[in-house]
Amino acid sequence: MGLGGHGCRSHGRQFGQAGAPPAAAFTVRPSCIPGRLFGQACSFGWLAMLAAFPSPPAWAQVQPGSMGPLQRLPQAQSQPLPRTVAQVGQAGTGADTAGLERSWQELDQQLRALDGLIPAEPGVKAIDPRVLPPVPQLLLDANAPASVQLNPAKALPAAPLGLPGPSSLQAGPVQSLTLEQALAIAFANSATLQAQREQVAAFTAQLRATQGLYWPTLSAVVSGSSGQSSSSLYAPVGNTGLGFGPNFAMPSGAFAVPTGGGAYLNTYSTSAGAGLQLNYALLDFARNPVVQAARAQLGAARTTYASQLRSLQLQVSEAYFQLQQADQTVRINQATLANDLVILAESLDLQRAGLVPRLNGLRRNAISASDQQTLIQSLADRAVARRQLAVLLNLPPQITPAARDPIRPLARWPLNLEQSLLAAYRGNPELETILATREALLRQRDATAAGLLPKLSLFAGGGLSGSSTSTFDITASGGGCCGATVIPMLNQSGYDWSLGLTLQWLLFDGGSTANQAEALARQAAASSQTYAAERNAIRLRLETAFFNHEASLAKLAAARLGVTASLEAFRDVKLRYQSGLSSEVDLSDTQRQLVTSLLQRLNATVGVNVTYARLLRELLPMPRDPALPVQPRLSLDGATAF
């Protein structure tokens, strides 16, 4: 906008100069663009007359390193503007210059009130608006470029029950890797996959345990004991008067016990035995259902493992694509900020030459500061994206990954929607997991109901035994007692065996077994509904990914056209601005449109890749057995990117 004669004057001073004569009248020419550079006048006609102020108004005096009067007067109260639009327009017709000045003063009060809503931070030094603040060093370190390529052999995870120490938390060099390498490392290092492998091994062992029910059990039984006892015998009434014959007559009867006779003795004995015991269920209606339930649970664990492989590949792919997006976003923001600084320098040169108002330089300062904020946030986003990928890969704490693959769109999905849906349903591990879980519940119901049926078992056993008994400290009193044969040392040995059948039939348990079987049957019925819900969810996920994939391809084609047009428009408007044929507003709008087009192309490219990965997740075949190797597959049919 050209003002006055030669050069541009505002509020009684020429742009780029320190001051101007007071009360110098000048004429405003709206939308006047300098027709000639470096001090030559515009060729447009005069439109209005305004009286100049002796000095610039208070709100326009901004010193470097401060926020101007807005910062100096934060306590200003909001005052309503009493002047109407018509009055303001009338004041600008030329006569009432004092009214126009009062309007500016009222605007100054309003701006002070707005600035006072956010008080100044204590201890913050004044900042030169012409100098951008530095980027935090922590962000720069976290966004360092990759210096080496990641070696998968050195990317082993830390101990699962360990905690990192201070030395392991120190960041090492940033290491780059491809998407295929990332998938291979994730398949080998993932803690979730390793836990599921342990679950598969556990269910395998449980199946082998239930298969042992078809075999008899054979047990070895060994026993041994040792002990001592003391006995004191006394007969208050003897048996000599019973008339049983000479053997019960005193004094020579072998079994005669006189009245008042007694005896005392100690006995020490040691015994041992060993044998075998055999048990075999001849008839057990619960045995087959228990084995079938364990086999179904193993199948569910294996299909869960395959489903987790699919999910992990999708998570790693999305994290890798998001890291690529973060890298490219940082590059776009860096280029934008660098371009801002070039335009800012040109604006300051034009301002010093008196060809553009100071407003252009201030606006470019604000745009540069805003773009620097965007760059700083994109640096933080890339640092977070790197750590997210490191967590998915379960890398050691000191390793920071970076994407090595260039960002490019994958090929179009090779199948149509109907073919994709049929292929997604066929052999889907998520659906097979639900079916296996339902089968396990039904077999558990059968095993529980079999508790109401008879069970016939065979048992057999045999073994050897032996004992040794010694009697000592034998003392008789009152003619002796009890007529027992006392042997100082006695050894005894022998064997035994047994064979038989056991029939067990539960006749009544208050309905406990029947109700448990009913509960398992209801759970199996609920799993059928879960199957239907998952089937619908698979279709929704696949259709969502399919439609978004097609939309992303179309948006990518449009974004490419937009980038080409925006780039040419930015080149033209920049030349026009440097030649004085376009305003700084046109330059800013065109630059903003170029950045938007670049981001749209980037987002469309990432959208193509992410939706392809989501489609691949629904159809990608994965091994059920954890012992089999897992080969990363980046496409359904090996198509290459275009």
Image: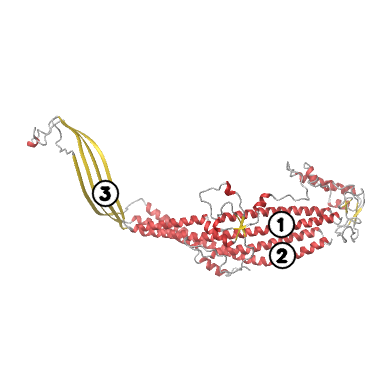
Q: Alpha carbon of mark 3 to alpha carbon of mark 2: how far?
A: 91 Å
Where residue 534 appears, x then y in whole percent?
A: 52, 61
Which sits in the foreground, 140 or 481? 140
Query: Please, what secondary structure does the residue beneath circle 2 have?
Result: helix
Residue at point 35% right, 51% down? Answer: 509
Which sits in the foreground, 482 or 393? 393
Q: Are marks 3 and 1 in contact (CB under 8 Å)?
A: no
- Which label is found at residue 140? none
Which sits in the foreground, 633 or 43? 633
The amino acid type, in three-letter code, at marker 2 is Val
The amino acid type, in three-letter code, at marker 1 is Gln
Where residue 244 appears, x then y in whole percent?
A: 8, 37
Earlier residue among tags 3 and 1 = 3
Residue occupied by mark 1: 334
Residue occupied by mark 3: 274
Can residue 533 be seen here? The reply is no
What is the quadrant of residue 211 in the picture?
Answer: bottom left
Residue occupied by mark 2: 563
Is residue 206 toward the left or the right of residue 379 in the image?
left
